[in-house]
Image (cartoon, rainbow, N blue to C red):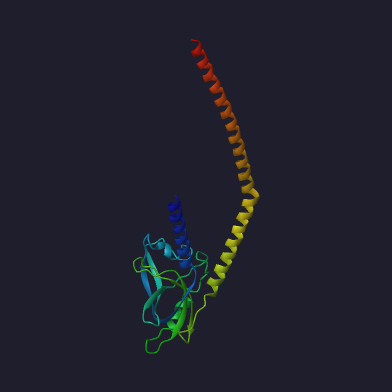
Amino acid sequence: MRRLKWIVITLVLLFIGGFLEYTLPQHDIVRITGTEVIRQDFSRWNRIFYAQPDTGNVNIRNRDLRLVNAAFPDGSIMVYRNEDTGWGWPPYFKFDTSDIQAKAADLVSTRAAPRWAVVTHYGWRSQFLSIYPNIVKIREIKDPNITIIPWFNIFFFIVMALLLLGFYRMVQKFKRRRIDPVLEDMGETWDRIEDQADVVSTRTSGLWVRFLAWLKSWQAKK
């Protein structure tokens, strides 16, 4: 049971960690190499990673999808999608897909004359599932070696830690006020039951001993 408990806890933590890693904003410093619109096919495996029906009709088998191609300073590449999140999840309230596509097209540059940009996005890139991280914001920078501090993520984890601490203290207070007294009463009741059971057992043993003695006395008389 202890091993099963830790397996369940590990799976829950992995799920929460994966959910947060997918949802929270991330920042890439890249060079935009091009933009394009492709016809994206959807399957039951990747449909969940794209826009919901209120921001884009995913009930059809395929539709147009805006992409932004980019390259990192070390030469590796990345492909982003660019679509609205609307009022759905995750709550980025993004409605400016066309503007971001235009800005990305304006930042297209070559390796010989690079222009660098910070791309804020969420999501994962998987060639197997044909999914792309979604651009939330893009802005030009001069130096690709700058350090991006994820202030939102830091603030989010601080708030989450405070909420968890407050919830833990609330549970402990509730446990002390409501659960511990009940458990203590149950323990006292169980002790009384055990004491009564001991008394009954002692009396029963005494009666049994007397009964056996009585039988022996009758046998002796015979």
- Quarter location, residue 111: bottom left
Tell me: 208 left or right of 130.
right
Tell me: 220 left or right of 38.
right
Q: Residue furthest right?
A: 177
Q: Is residue 188 above or below residue 97?
A: above
Give coordinates of residue 24: x percent, y percent: 49, 69
Q: Residue furthest front?
A: 220
Total residue callouts: 0
Give coordinates of residue 215: x percent, y percent: 51, 16
Q: Residue furthest left?
A: 128
> Which residue occupies 65% across, 50% down?
177
- Quarter location, residue 76: bottom left
> Which residue occupies 52% across, 20% down?
212
Give coordinates of residue 220: x percent, y percent: 50, 13
> Which residue occupies 61% across, 51% down?
175
Tell me: 41 left or right of 91.
left
Which is nearer the eye, 55 or 18? 18
Q: Is residue 155 above or below residue 169?
A: below
Tell me: 63 left or right of 214.
left
Give coordinates of residue 199: x percent, y percent: 60, 30
Q: Residue furthest bottom?
A: 113
Q: Is residue 44 above or below residue 65?
A: above
